[in-house]
Image: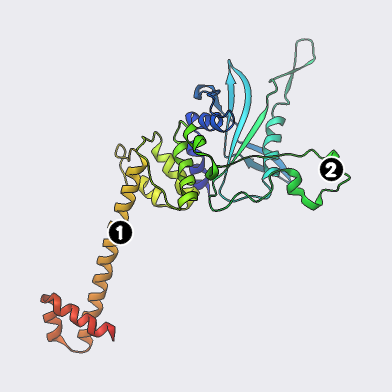
C-alpha cells in the first residue's frame, strides 16, 4: 500500500505537473501559477480518533507563494473509485490546514501577534474512473443524507468537493495540459471512449513517474514492467514507444510460454512411451518431428 501511495504522488509532486493541473482545471488554461511559485506542503496532520491520536495524509499538496507570501495551500486527492465519505475527508484535510494558520507569538508590548497570514485552502479531487461517472456524495449534505434533520439544515454549513472526472474532460481541456499529466488524462479519455489506448509520439519528460502512475491507477502492471526492465538512459521517449515495448514483451512472453508448454508436452509423451515400453517409437520420435507429432496426436487426443 505504501508503494502504491508513493507511486500515485510521484508525478504530481513535480512542480511543473502540479502547476499545470491547477492552471488548467482551476484557472481554465491561464498560466497563473509557475513551478517556481510552489513549495512543498505539509501533507500529514494529527487528529483525535476515539482515544488515540491518528494521522491523516493528503496525496499531494503545495503552498502557492509569491514574494515569500503564501497565497494559497492547494491539495490534490486521487481516486479510482467513487468514495461516499469524500466530503468528510476533504473537510478534515482543509480543516487541519486552516488550524495550522492559527499560531501566535508575544510581541514586544506583550500582545499576541500572528505568526502567519491567512490564506485559502483548496482541494481538488481527481477521479480516474472511466467506466462510470462519480455516483457518490459530492457535498456534506449528500453524505449525511437522511441523517440531516431538516430543522438543523439551516445551521449546518454544506461543504462541497471540487471534483474533476478526468476521463470526461473535453478535448480542449486535454489539449490545455502542458505537462506530462496530459498523457495520463488522455489515456483515461481514450479508454472511456474506445476501450483502447493509442500512444502519442510527444516526448514525455517524467516517463518513469508517468508509467508508475498509470500502473497503480489501472492495475495494469505492464507499464511498471517497462520501467523495471530498462536501464537508465534507455527509457522510451514517448507513449508510442511504450506500447511497442509492451507488445514486444507480450510476444516474447508468449513464445517463452509456448516453448515451456512444448517441452512439457514432449516430456509427457516420452514418459508415456517409456511407461508402455515403446522404446522404438521413442527413439524414432526423437529424430523424426513428423512422427513425434503423429504420436502426440494419437496419444493425447485419446
Quarter of the rendering occupied by the C terminus: bottom left
Judge from the rendering whether residue 175 lies leftward or rightward of residue 134; answer left or right: left
Q: Nearer the viewer, residue 117 or 162?
A: 162
Residue density around tag 1, few if under 14, some if 14–19, many if 20 or more, within 10 Å: few
Cβ–Cβ under 8 Å for marks 1 and 2: no
Q: Nearer the viewer, residue 272 or 26?
A: 26
The answer to whether one can see residue 50 in this image is no
The image position of residue 74, as x and y in percent, is 61, 31
Residue extending furthest toward the bottom = 276
Residue 158, by quadrant, is: top right
Residue 113, by quadrant, is: top right
Judge from the rendering whether residue 190 lies leftward or rightward of residue 70; answer left or right: left
Residue for point 33% across, 37% down: 237
Residue extending furthest toward the right = 151
The image position of residue 157, as x and y in percent, is 79, 38
The answer to whether one can see residue 223 in this image is yes
Judge from the rendering whether residue 261 lies leftward or rightward of residue 38; answer left or right: left
The image position of residue 71, as x and y in percent, is 63, 22
Q: Earlier in the sequence, mark 1 or mark 2?
A: 2
Q: How is the image coloured?
A: rainbow
Judge from the rendering whether residue 83 lies leftward or rightward of residue 110; answer left or right: left
Please count the marks in the image.
2
- Judging by the rendered image, the residue that carries numbered circle 1 is 253
CA separation, marks 1 and 2?
A: 60 Å
Q: Which mark is residue 153?
A: 2
The image position of residue 288, as x and y in percent, is 11, 77
Q: Which mark is residue 136?
A: none
Q: Mark 1 or mark 2, which is nearer to you? A: 2
Quick one: SS at disc 1? Answer: helix
Quick one: SS at disc 2? Answer: helix
Residue density around tag 2, few if under 14, some if 14–19, many if 20 or more, within 10 Å: few
Looking at the image, residue 195 lies above or below residue 280: above
Amino acid at each position: 500500500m505504501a508503494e502504491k501511495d508513493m507511486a500515485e504522488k510521484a508525478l504530481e509532486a513535480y512542480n511543473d505537473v502540479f502547476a499545470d493541473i491547477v492552471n488548467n482545471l482551476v484557472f481554465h488554461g491561464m498560466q497563473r501559477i509557475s513551478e517556481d511559485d510552489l513549495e512543498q506542503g505539509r501533507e500529514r496532520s494529527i487528529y483525535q480518533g476515539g482515544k488515540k491520536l491518528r494521522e491523516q495524509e493528503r496525496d499531494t499538496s503545495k503552498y502557492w507563494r509569491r514574494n515569500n507570501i503564501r497565497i494559497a495551500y492547494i491539495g490534490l486527492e486521487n481516486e479510482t473509485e467513487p468514495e461516499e465519505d469524500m466530503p468528510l475527508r476533504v473537510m478534515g484535510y482543509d480543516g487541519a490546514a486552516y488550524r495550522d494558520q492559527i499560531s501566535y507569538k508575544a510581541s514586544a508590548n506583550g500582545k499576541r501577534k500572528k505568526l502567519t497570514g491567512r490564506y485559502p485552502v483548496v482541494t481538488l479531487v481527481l477521479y480516474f474512473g472511466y467506466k462510470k461517472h462519480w455516483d457518490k456524495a459530492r457535498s456534506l449534505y449528500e453524505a449525511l443524507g437522511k441523517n440531516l434533520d431538516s430543522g438543523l439544515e439551516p445551521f449546518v454549513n454544506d461543504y462541497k468537493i471540487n471534483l474533476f472526472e478526468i476521463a470526461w474532460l473535453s478535448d480542449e481541456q486535454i489539449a490545455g495540459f502542458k505537462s506530462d499529466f496530459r498523457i495520463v488524462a488522455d489515456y483515461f479519455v481514450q479508454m472511456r471512449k474506445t476501450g483502447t489506448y493509442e500512444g502519442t509520439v510527444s516526448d514525455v519528460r517524467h516517463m518513469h513517474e508517468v508509467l508508475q502512475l498509470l500502473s497503480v491507477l489501472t492495475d495494469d502492471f505492464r507499464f511498471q514492467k517497462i520501467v523495471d526492465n530498462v536501464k537508465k538512459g534507455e527509457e522510451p521517449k514517448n507513449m508510442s514507444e511504450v506500447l511497442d515495448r509492451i507488445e514486444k514483451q507480450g510476444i516474447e512472453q508468449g513464445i517463452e510460454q509456448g516453448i515451456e508448454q512444448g517441452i512439457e508436452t514432449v516430456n509427457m509423451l516420452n514418459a508415456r512411451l517409456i511407461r508402455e515400453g515403446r522404446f522404438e517409437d521413442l527413439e524414432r520420435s526423437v529424430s523424426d518431428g513428423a512422427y513425434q507429432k503423429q504420436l502426440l496426436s494419437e496419444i493425447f487426443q485419446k
